[in-house]
Image (tube, rainbow, N blue to C red):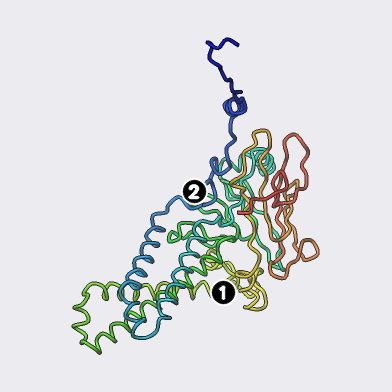
Amino acid sequence: MDPGMTECQYSQISTVASSLMESQLGKKIPKRKWQTFPGRNKFYCNGRIMMGRQTGVFYLTMVLIVVTSGLFFAFDCPFLASSLTPAIPAIGGFLFLFVMGMLFRASFSDPGVLPRATPDEAAHLESQIGDDDINSRSPPRTQEVVINGQTVKLKYCFTCKIFRPPRVSHCSLCDNCVERFDHHCPWVGNCVGKRNYRFFYLFILSLSFLTIFIFAFVITHIVLRSSQTGFLSALKDSPARYPSKVVVCFFSVWSIVGLSGFHTYLIGSNQTTNEDIKGLWSSKRGKGNYNPYSYSSVITNCCAALCGPLPPSLIDRRGFIQPDTPQTAIQSNGTTAYVASQPQAHMEVTSDSCFHSSLWPPYLFVLPTVVSAKPPTLRLLGQTENGYLDPL
């Protein structure tokens, strides 16, 4: 080798990264289902958080709880811990964390939204009902099922193109059909339904205890200060702090405790706010107009609402959209429910015709379905095309 020539070293260039970039540029990344969700909802954290469209009142709720509790912990708890017991700030902190946890759980969860019918399913259903009736928006066509001896009508939803299963109602604010729809709560910024009702109830119940706790110990703080320096001197030490907390807690106690009592009554009778307002199972309509979903015991009703298994989400909002795969039909879970090939005018539900659970009342609902160029089939609700559900 010529000593005058410099030695050159060659390194192998990796082509893995370049080929990967070329494949990503040539292949379009599929979208997730929450990005094309038809309802009026907001999604955060790549679809993990689901809320209603109007969230301003939710932030007001959070600010009121945080500010009121923060003033209590900053100005009242040090004096109460030294004068009475250190357990006061510990109990208050636990209640505050539990309230915020239940608020976030109720606000960020899927309340039980039912997927809308696919175009093929909607076309098949409209052909069964009649295009003239659909376009003219005549009185909704109904189907009837018998649940525990009580006739329940299934109404047709013009937006979702389905017959609503029992206890399902369409929320006009979120534009979705929700399972066991209770109401749309602006304070939590979401609908309250089958999947988040227990968290909503625990939120208002724990908030009642927190409000009473803060109100009682703020009054205790004022009384102890007054016994030492006098009432006027205690107010002069902080003229704005005590009246603001007392006024906020005083008016909050009556509304929140009353709301908690109302929902305790609903849970004990196994009703929803929507059913109670409409008076569907009112005794004034006659002795035969009983609630078919209620059990014989108040304890059983409470266990069914608060201690039963949490059903999975049916909309699979974090799943990828497959352009060649038809969308799934309306799904259900908890109890066994089937999609029938043709609508039924009337059917009776008994414990022999469906899955029976000790906590969940059995019912079936009938929906027509068709799967792209294939004859109508019987399909189990609660499954996606690949057999899996979104666990969130």
197 sits left or right of 338 in the view: left
Crowd band around label 2 with a 10 angstrom C-alpha radius: few (<14), some (14–19), many (20+)? few
> Residue 62 appears at what percent x and percent y?
40, 62
Name the residue type under label 2. Answer: Tyr
Nearer to us: label 2 or label 1: 2
Q: CA distance from mark 2 to mark 1?
A: 46 Å
The residue that disc 2 covers is 44
Q: Quadrant of the N terminus?
A: top right
Q: Secondary structure at mark 1?
A: helix
The residue that disc 1 covers is 284
Crowd band around label 1 with a 10 angstrom C-alpha radius: few (<14), some (14–19), many (20+)? few
> Residue 256 appears at what percent x and percent y?
42, 72
Corner quadrant of residue 25: top right
- The reply to whether residue 154 is in sight is no
> Residue 362 appears at what percent x and percent y?
72, 64
Q: Which mark is residue 119?
A: none
Q: What residue is shown at x 47% (from left), y 70% (from top)?
A: 204
Q: Secondary structure at mark 2?
A: strand
